[in-house]
Amino acid sequence: MKIAVCEGDGIGREVIPVAKKVLMHFLPDADYSDIFLGYEKWEKEGCACTEDDISAMKGSDAILFGAVTTPPDPDYKSILLKIRHELDLYANLRPVRGGSFDIMVVRENTEGLYSGIEELGDERSTTLRVVTRKGSERIARKACELSADRGFRKPLVIGNKANVLKSDILFRDTCIKTADACGVLYKTMFIDALTLDVLMHPERYDVIVTTNMFGDILSDACGYLTGGLGMLPSANIGEKYAFFEPVHGSAPDIAGKGIANPVAAIRSAAMMLEHFGMKREAEIIEECILRSIISGVCTPDLGGSAGTGEFGDRIFECILKRES
Ligand code: NAI
Ligand code: MG
């Protein structure tokens, strides 16, 4: 099995080594390769992500990714968008879990407002929001599958803004048709009211499917429920490739201080294990994360005083104990 690891920039370099150590513990025989990309590469080489980097990702069974800084250049195109397009990672799965809730935000990852069709002008700038039937159908099918895997605990929620956006009429109606065809109970909600209600009553939700930018914002907002961005993992899944990364970015404000929370990265590694069918191992990791936090060994964002390494070590020691 081949696993590509890209730390990226900023705190990606601090949290990914911790997550990689956990991954290597459970998959000691996998073939690991490191890919260097991001802002620093752009500064040094004039290109943040080369075709070779993309080929290296395509040659892997899964990719663990940190975060990249977006260079201050209006001509620069996000490399994450490039990677998501090139690998056709159409489903961005963002779980949000807490004591009384377990939500899965299923975000369409290749079109919508992030289609990359835009123009920057001095007086007028435009971004085209593209929604296709094919794109909506496949993300809706993925959400229906997840809803079934999770035991149809609650109706599938279709987050949209079809009252204002024509493109969301196609999205909403395609999701409804797909849910009907799959025999999945659903309800539709407008994304703004939905976001508030998820924060107020997270226990009412299970799987939420929505378009690209709405899913981006909704999942970051859900960080409020779990102790911040340092806690949220994600998986980017396509027909062929699988890419795992924390929801957070490179956090330049704390990079280099050794205080970044490694949980989002470790949970992303756990999602990779689950993707490979290693559900029990993922559960052990989750249990050890919670134990470490309860014991008070955690980073400042969670109210503790441990550094990234100490927090990671505590989680790792717990894993070793649980395993023996
Ligand atoms: P960010 O997620 O990097 O940081 C937002 C806030 O959350 C900051 O105060 C940061 O210190 C805190 N934070 C984030 N992760 C944390 C962690 N693990 N532990 C403790 N605190 C944490 O988002 P921001 O500031 O909007 O973007 C910074 C850079 O990252 C930008 O260049 C942006 O383009 C990029 N970015 C990259 C992403 C990716 O590669 N997937 C995703 C989001 C942003
Ligand atoms: Mg985001």
Image: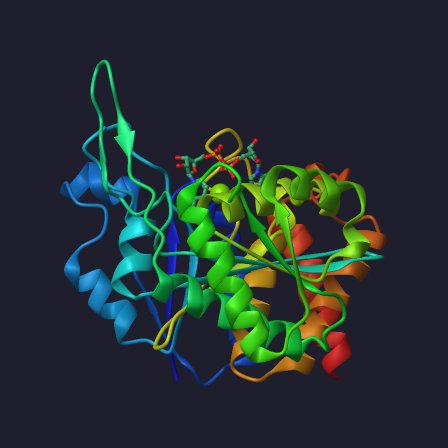
Return the x and y of residue 48 as percentages of the image width and height.
23, 46
Q: With respect to residue 307, does 141 lie above or below?
A: below
Q: Residue at image x 53%, y 33%?
A: 254
| Left or right: 219 as drawn, with respect to 66 | right
Q: In this image, 139 relative to 153: left or right? A: left
In this rendering, is residue 15 above or below 266?
above
**Farthest top residue in view:** 123
Q: Residue 190, located in which quarter of the rendered image?
A: top right
Q: Residue at x 46, y 50 (%)?
A: 169
In front of the other: 269 or 118: 118
Please state the horizontal and vertical placement of residue 95, each as a whole percent of the image.
Answer: 63, 59
In the rendered structure, the answer to whether residue 273 lies left or right of residue 12 reads: right
The quadrant holding residue 114 is top left
In this rendering, position of residue 252 left or right of residue 110: right
Residue 37 can be seen, yes or no: no
Q: Quadrant of the C terminus?
A: bottom right
Q: In this view, does 233 lie above or below 302?
A: below
Task: Give the residue displayed 46% in from the left and 44% down from the top.
Answer: 213
